[in-house]
Amino acid sequence: MRRVLRRFQTLPIRSRLAMLVAAAVAFAVAAVSMTCWFIVQGKLYDQLDSDLQKASAMRPGQLQDIADALNNCTHTPQKSFNGYRNTYSQAITADGTSCLLPNSVGIVKTTEGDKNVVKHADRNRGLYHNSTDGDGNAVRVLTLPLPLVVTDTKTGVSSNTALVVAVSLRSTENTLKDLALILLLVSGIGVLGAGAAGLVVARAGLRPVDKLTEAVEHVARTEDLGIRIPVADDSEDEIARLSRSFNSMTASLASSRELQQQLIADAGHELRTPLTSLRTNIELLTRSEETGRPIPPADRKALLASVKAQMTELASLIGDLQELARSEGQRGERVQVVSLQDTVEAALRRARLRGPELTITADLQPWYVRAEPSALERAVVNILDNAVKFSPEAGTIEVQLDHGVLTVRDHGPGIPADELPYVFDRFWRSPSARALPGSGLGLSIVARTVEQAGGEVTLTHAQGGGTVATIRLPGAPTAPPDWPA
């Protein structure tokens, strides 16, 4: 059985569906056919029993004929036109002795049930059963007790009697055999038709699955993520949902690959400049060592400072690229309840070290959010770094945190209105800031981190000059006890 089940599971889905449909139809047809056969059999037997009941009806003088037949017992049929033709009729006694009546066409073999009818005549109204005649032919029998007692002339023992009436079952059995054959043929045709219909339906129903399979194989073979499976707008079945999910998945993968390719291209472009400058400076230092022509100390110091700055810029750029390359799942595993107030204070300490000549004021109120601690701190540091970078010497930076709204105000030159839509794009840098250190990824990291925390970030012009960076994060002024860290 297990081998059959394993073999069945290895078949194609359409074959399994066709077989299951055929099996279900076969079961239903078999049940209906058997029910029909038994109903017809019951009706035919009821008709025979009705005929036997009519044949057993007592006519005037028949009781005397039965008594005479018992006194002159014979087993040889007598030609007579009384009663029903083709009917078996005989009288029996308690010891099983049978005597044919004049209108009988043959003798019927008696059973223990017939003898019990004679023995318990006062408690029996008649017995219907099947038996055989003297030639072995099947007959339907009715045994009725008679109000007649006979005495054996030899032994002097008295005995009750019963009338046995029977009709042949040949016609009935032939009809039932023909019906069984017809039902068998119809059932076979129905099962074959159901199997064929199931195969057709399975093919039609699984056609979207075939298209989906072809699409998946095409993607695996060509890595073409632009393929789409057509789905009707009003279709809500499982296949339509699967097709929509596949289309959504390929669209997301295509978008992700496009962003990845764009990131690689932009990163290559951004890396080319510092690497070229770094290579040039190192070649100058190397050539100086090889040729024995020392570089003036001031120039050498400037070259080494440039190399150090370029190395720092490369390290920062690589760190930013790693931050952008991390997957959503990796981020989600480290999300916890974070005190935004503590995060901003830590970022302020780093910002004050980078701009010691600046005045940074802070007014921070408690606020708790769900975010990745290190990513959130990096985002706040990037915002503060921008403010430090563009603030004038001895300038002021104002930081405020109130009910989940963090604002950072600087007094720098501000951002032109036509550049505001691009400030959060990857590697985008204002033409006026190209000479300043940076990779153009800082604000992009800020936007991504804040969005993952369920908030939003904006940059706007400040009244009186400068820029205001605003970060809004959902949360609460206190950490709820049931909010897992």
Image (cartoon, rainbow, N blue to C red):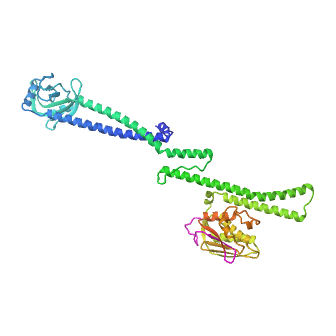
Q: Quick check: 112 left or right of 417?
A: left
- Most distant residue in the bottom direction: 464
Q: Quick check: 194 left or right of 366?
A: left
**Residue 467 appears in view:** yes
Q: Is residue 114 above or below residue 433?
A: above
How many marks on residues?
A: 0
Range shown magenta: 462-485
- Most distant residue in the right direction: 292
- Closest to the observer: 70 or 272? 272
Quadrant of the rendering where the C terminus is positioned: bottom right
Q: In which quadrant of the rendered view does residue 145 lie?
A: top left
Q: In which quadrant of the rendered view does residue 117 lie?
A: top left
Q: x%, y% of residue 316?
A: 73, 62
From the image, give the main secondary structure of the stretch colored magenta: loop
Q: Is residue 469 magenta?
A: yes
Residue at position x 59%, y 73% from top? 403
**Residue 152 appears in view:** no
Q: x%, y% of residue 324?
A: 67, 59
Q: Quick check: 224 left or right of 352?
A: left
Q: Quick check: 239 left or right of 346?
A: left
Q: x%, y% of residue 308?
A: 81, 62
